C-alpha cells in the first residue's frame, strides 16, 4: 500500500467513530420525534418521510417516486398515504401525462407540518453551529453535500444502496 493510501486509511479510521456517533445521534436521540412534539404534530416516521419527500421536491410525485426517495416498496407508501389522505395532509391527483398513474401532493395542512418541522430542525442545527465562523459553516455544508453525493453514487454504482 502506498504511503498516501495508508495515510488516507489512517485518517478515515480516525473519523469513523465520529461518523458512527453522528449516525447514532441522529437515530437514537429521537430528534425527529422531538421535532414532531415541538411542532405539535402526531405522525409516524413513514408518514413524516412521505410529507418531507413531497415538501423537499416542491411538487406532486407518483407513489413509486416517493417510494424510491424513501428507499422502500410502493405498497408500504400506499398504506401510509391512505392515512395521510384521511387526515387531509396529502391528496391524490390525476397524472396529466398518464391517466393510469396517480400523483400525490401536499395539502396546505401537510405543507404547514413540513414547514414547521424543517424550520425546527434547522433552528436546532443552526444553534449547534452558532459558534462556527461563516467560513467554517460554508466549508462544512459544501463538504457534507459532496460527501453525501459521492457516497450515494458509490453505493449506487456498487449495488449497495438497498
Image: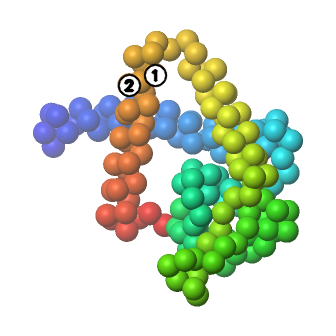
Can residue 51 be seen in the rendering of this structure? yes
Q: Is residue 95 left or right of residue 90?
A: left
Circle 2 crowding by C-alpha within 10 Å: few under 14, some 14–19, many from 20: few
Query: Where, by quadrant of the figure, is residue 34 drawn?
Result: top right
Identify the residue at horizontal 73%, vertical 39% (top origin). Answer: 116
Q: Secondary structure at mark 2?
A: helix
- Side of 8 where 111 appears, left or right: right
Query: With respect to residue 95, does 125 lie above or below?
Result: above
Q: In this figure, what is the number of numbered marks?
A: 2
Query: Which residue lies at the image location 57% right of the left edge and 85% below the top edge?
Result: 99
What is the number of the mark on residue 146?
A: none
In the rendered image, the residue lying farthest to the bottom is 100
Q: Residue at x 44, y 31 (%)?
A: 141
Quarter of the figure with residue 106: bottom right
Q: Nearer the viewer, residue 67 or 31?
A: 67
C-alpha span from label 1 to label 2: 5 Å
Q: Secondary structure at mark 1?
A: helix
Contact? badges 1 and 2 (CB < 8 Å): yes
Note whether residue 32 is visible: no
Is residue 147 shown above or below 62?
A: above
Q: In the visual, does 36 lie left or right of 162?
A: right
Q: Which residue in the protein does label 1 denote?
A: 137
- Please provide percent x and percent y for residue 61: 57, 67
- Nearest the eye: 89 or 34: 89
Residue highlighted by disc 2: 139
Give the residue at the far front of this rendering: 96
Tell me where residue 148 appears, x and y as whole percent: 42, 45
From the viewer's side, name the closer residue of 114 and 135.
114
Few, some or many residues within 10 Å of mark 1 (<14, 14–19, 20+): some
Identity of the residue drawn at 15% across and 43% down = 1
Q: Nearer the viewer, residue 102 or 135?
A: 102
Amino acid at each position: 500500500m502506498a504511503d498516501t493510501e495508508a495515510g488516507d486509511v489512517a485518517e478515515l479510521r480516525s473519523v469513523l467513530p465520529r461518523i458512527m456517533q453522528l449516525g447514532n445521534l441522529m437515530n437514537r436521540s429521537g430528534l425527529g420525534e422531538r421535532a414532531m412534539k415541538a411542532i405539535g404534530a402526531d405522525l409516524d416516521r413513514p408518514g413524516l418521510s412521505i410529507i418531507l419527500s413531497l415538501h423537499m421536491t416542491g411538487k406532486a410525485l407518483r407513489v413509486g417516486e416517493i417510494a424510491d426517495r424513501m428507499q422502500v416498496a410502493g405498497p408500504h407508501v400506499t398504506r401510509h398515504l391512505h392515512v395521510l389522505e384521511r387526515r387531509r395532509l396529502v391528496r391524490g391527483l390525476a397524472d396529466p401525462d398518464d391517466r393510469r398513474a396517480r400523483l400525490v401532493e401536499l395539502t396546505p395542512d401537510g405543507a404547514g407540518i413540513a414547514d414547521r418541522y424543517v424550520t425546527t430542525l434547522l433552528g436546532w442545527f443552526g444553534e449547534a453551529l452558532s459558534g462556527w465562523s461563516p467560513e467554517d459553516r460554508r466549508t462544512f455544508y459544501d463538504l457534507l453535500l459532496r460527501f453525501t453525493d459521492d457516497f450515494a453514487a458509490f453505493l449506487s454504482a456498487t449495488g449497495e444502496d438497498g
